[in-house]
Amino acid sequence: MNYAIALVPGDGIGPEVIAPATDALDAVGDKYGHIFNYAELEAGGKAVDTVGEPLPAGTLEAAKECDALLLGAVGGPKWDTLPGHLRPERALLGLRAGLGVFANLRPAYLLPQLQKACPLKDEILIAGNPEKKPTFNFLIVRELTGGLYFGDRGRSGDHKSAFDTETYSWEEIERTLRTGYDAAMVRRKKLCLVDKANVLESSRLWREVAGTVSKEYPEVETSYMYVDNCAMQIIRCPGQFDVIVTSNLFGDILSDEASVLTGSIGMLPSASLGARGKAERTMGMYEPIHGSAPDIAGKDIANPLGTILSAALMLRYSFGLEKEAAAVETAVTSVLDAGLRTKDIAGFSEAETIVGTKAMGEAVLKALEK
């Protein structure tokens, strides 16, 4: 099979972590008989420097012609003083809206090889785990195209006050919830809707929609939790969660909080999914959840595993290649079993070998070729 992949390396460490991911994809293609064709596109700060805007029209149009998009990272302090519409991060919002991806899946799990890198005590991890092991594995489903990030905003005439509006429609909420319930059905069949319904009218609408959609998933246990309590519970007892569904803003914050418990933000992938498109493939935008990390760019110390695992999610969700996705994930596990660590996940065991970005990517490649 042939697949067209839009590549947006972006800024900072983005190009460094994208390269090992495409190498892994090519190895999968060689092993299982697939061809991945790449279209490298500009977006983010690099595009601002080149053409004066974070998301050129040509980038979006070219991405729409592909089956999926793999992104490194965008942004950096170099562009922090630009007005909002020219900030590199606007490229992310534009790509999500333009590609029609509306649900962001951010898995948060603790690999046994990185258990010592988790700041939580073993007894906390064991307490919430149904298997009574010091680990956790939950999924945050974040709505992507509504809420504060896309609502009306502005400043007063004297610029001494500002506003951002949280707006959600029934349809936006329903399709995100369905994504969460479908995920819960193949996991532990537990879904927690996180909101601020004691204060926000938009959160109360989320609960109304959940009350309707949940009837179609009687096997899934549905619960509700305020976002401030959820932020505490993720630290206090992460094992209690299976699938968390929440709004754009809350999902952004909670998923970054959860990443700290996994050992490093550099380990975690994400998938932003839309409706099924051509040939019944699901359009998806895949990226590690870390930022552009300009302070370490060009130093060959960035962790590429989050991006490689994002490529695995692409194989699974957009292309339906489960065996191939599992092969990538197994390769990542094997290099960790061998004690290889990038700097961000090192220092927790004597049996470690610290390697750089390129060497870690090469190790995954070698594991895939076995």
Image: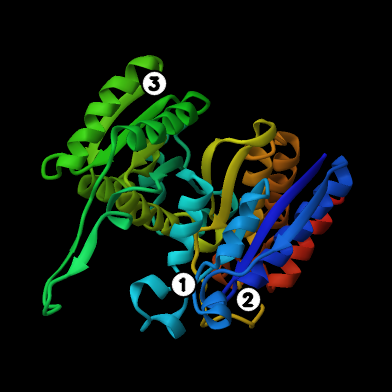
Relative image position of residue 196 (x, y in whole percent):
18, 44
Q: Could you tell whether 67 is left or right of 101 in the image?
A: right
At 38% from the left edge and 81% from the top edge, which residue is drawn?
Answer: 82
At 51% from the left edge and 56% from the top edge, which residue is drawn?
Answer: 95
Q: Could you tell whether 260 is left or right of 30 in the image?
A: left
- Tag 2's secondary structure? loop
Relative image position of residue 244 (x, y in whole percent):
37, 38
- From the viewer's side, name the closer residue of 220 and 311: 311
Q: Which residue has dot 3 on it?
A: 220
Say what amino acid the circle numbered 3 marks.
Val
At 49% from the left edge and 71% from the top edge, which residue is drawn?
Answer: 54
Relative to residue 222, is residue 286 depicted above or below? below
Numbered label attached to residue 301: 2
- Circle 2/circle 3 CB separation < 8 Å: no
Q: CA distance from mark 2 to mark 3?
A: 42 Å
- Circle 1/circle 3 CB separation < 8 Å: no
Numbered label attached to residue 207: none
Q: Could you tell whether 255 is left or right of 279 in the image?
A: left
Mark with earlier residue (2, 1): 1
At 53% from the left edge and 26% from the top edge, which residue is drawn?
Answer: 186
Say what amino acid the circle numbered 2 marks.
Ile
Relative to residue 223, is residue 154 depicted above or below? below
Relative image position of residue 176 (x, y in whole percent):
40, 36
Given this view, does label 2 or label 1 mark the residue nearer the observer? 1
Mark with earlier residue (1, 3): 1
Residue 133 in view (yes/no) = yes
- From the viewer's side, name the closer residue of 345 and 121: 345
Numbered label attached to residue 88: 1
Q: Dot 3 surroundings within 10 Å: few (below 14), some, or many (20 or more)?
A: some
Say what amino acid the circle numbered 1 marks.
Pro
